Amino acid sequence: MIIRSLRNRLAALFGLIVTGAIAVVYLSVVPPLEGQLRDQKVDALAESALVHVEPLRAVVGRDVPQARVGARLRVAAARSGARVTLLDVATGTEGRRLTVSVDSQPGADPADSRFVLAGQAVRTAHAARGTEPTAGGRVAEVAIPFEQDGAVTKVAVFTDGLEAVDANVAFIRRRVLLWGLVALAVALVAGYAVSRGVTARVRRLERAAGQVAAGDFSTRIRVDSDDELGRLAAAFDDMQRQLSELQTAREQFIATASHELRTPIFSLGGFLELLADEELDEPTRQEFLVQVRGQVQRLTKLATELLDLSRLGSGALELHPEPTDLGVLAHEVTAEFAPALLGHRSELELASPGNGVEVECDPERVAQVLRILIDNAIVHTPAGTPIQVSADRHDGEVRLAVTDSGPGIKRKSMPHIFEPFFTASDDGSRGAGLGLAIASELAGRMDGRLAADSRPGSTTFTLVLPA
């Protein structure tokens, strides 16, 4: 559980990053610094040796008493602050052999590291410098050869300890580690605090997601920043709002559909009870039968519209486009409404170009939209209202329009006319309000749109399809 916690993992990640940074700083600073300080020590010793070796060189190789040579050597040692050793170079059958002639600090071990650099100076006949390990620790050394008759006869070795350098390096190492641990502690605390804030925001989203999963859309998500989590919270809040609207629409849909279904069912039940009366006269019986047929037609239409709306919502509706002449299609559909127009005492005018309006579309679905628009014009206008159906091509689009000369749609109703179960009429019996919603969805599925324009005395619904 501790490892799975995002807060602990973020704090551990902070700690690992800082630990890695400390290790990089330590490895990139301490070893190079130690080398640089040692090189500086060797360079300073070499400069000092070259200065103070000259008085010693002046007495070496001549008939000068050994005591005087030793005195000069001790002066050079005192002035340079280093141990100075004068080695003799003897050439024999076994090669060159080095022996201590004079030492400013007598009693040195014959196996001292001085012989290593001295041997290098003898071989190259040039000064040699470097650091060497000894029993007492690493030392800086400079070996300067003395030549006589073209051969190296003696070597002066200047030796100085590196204790000060090692002490400085140890001090720096301790400081780096100390402040590194302090930085690590601060990073862990800061990382824990930051991760705690991040996980608190994540838990807030988690709780909101749980409420949404349980069907509660009332809690709003507070957007408290513009970072990634803030944008996630904003997206989640927008999703929650849309789900809330969808839930409200779903509940409204169920309630409205139940109401629309209940009304004709109750009417049918009432008429059936009346028709069961044996004393009912024949004209009244026939009138009731007409009413029953009307309610059955209403139920059939409502069930078909609900099925179409469901198929559109689920994406199950398939389109079968083919070359279609909208003028011919409009003529066929308008002919279906001859009885309804006669009963409405309305005239329908069909206007289309003589050369036809060809378009690639699903003729069955275009005909369904046209039927909805014509039926809508008949149902929602007074008897005797003229209706016009037109088809034309304009600016790379084809338009199939249905225009009526009725009273028009109220301005406040215009934004809602394509919503399911919305009807602009005051009399709910004039329709369930699904036709225009289905027509608009069908237009969108065909990569087109359904436009509406209404004012007193004229209302036009236009199906616009890409040519």
Image (cartoon, grey):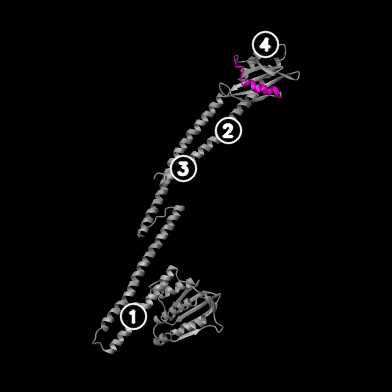
Labels 2 and 3: the sequence-earlier one: 3
**Image location (x, y in percent) of residue 27:** 54, 35
Tell me, yes or no, if residue 425 can be seen here. no
**Image location (x, y in percent) of residue 23:** 51, 37
Q: Is residue 106 above or below residue 33?
A: above
Labels 4 and 1: the sequence-earlier one: 4
Q: Is residue 185 above or below residue 144?
A: below
Q: Which residue is mark 2?
A: 32
Labels 4 and 3: the sequence-earlier one: 3
Q: Is residue 271 left or right of residue 187?
A: left
**Image location (x, y in percent) of residue 386:** 44, 85
Q: Is residue 29 above or below residue 157?
A: below
Marks 1 and 3: CB-CB under 8 Å?
Answer: no
Label 4 and label 3: CA atoms lie apart by: 69 Å
Labels 1 and 2: the sequence-earlier one: 2
**Was residue 109 drawn as part of the magenta stretch in this picture?**
yes
Crowd rating for badge 2 (residues with CA inside 10 Å; few <14, some 14–19, many 20+): few
Query: For the residue labelled by badge 2, is the local secondary structure a helix, a strand or a loop?
Result: helix
Which image quadrant: the C terminus? bottom right
Q: Which residue is mark 1?
A: 295
Could you tell me the amino acid type at mark 4? Gln
Could you tell me the amino acid type at mark 3? Phe
Q: Which residue is mark 3?
A: 14
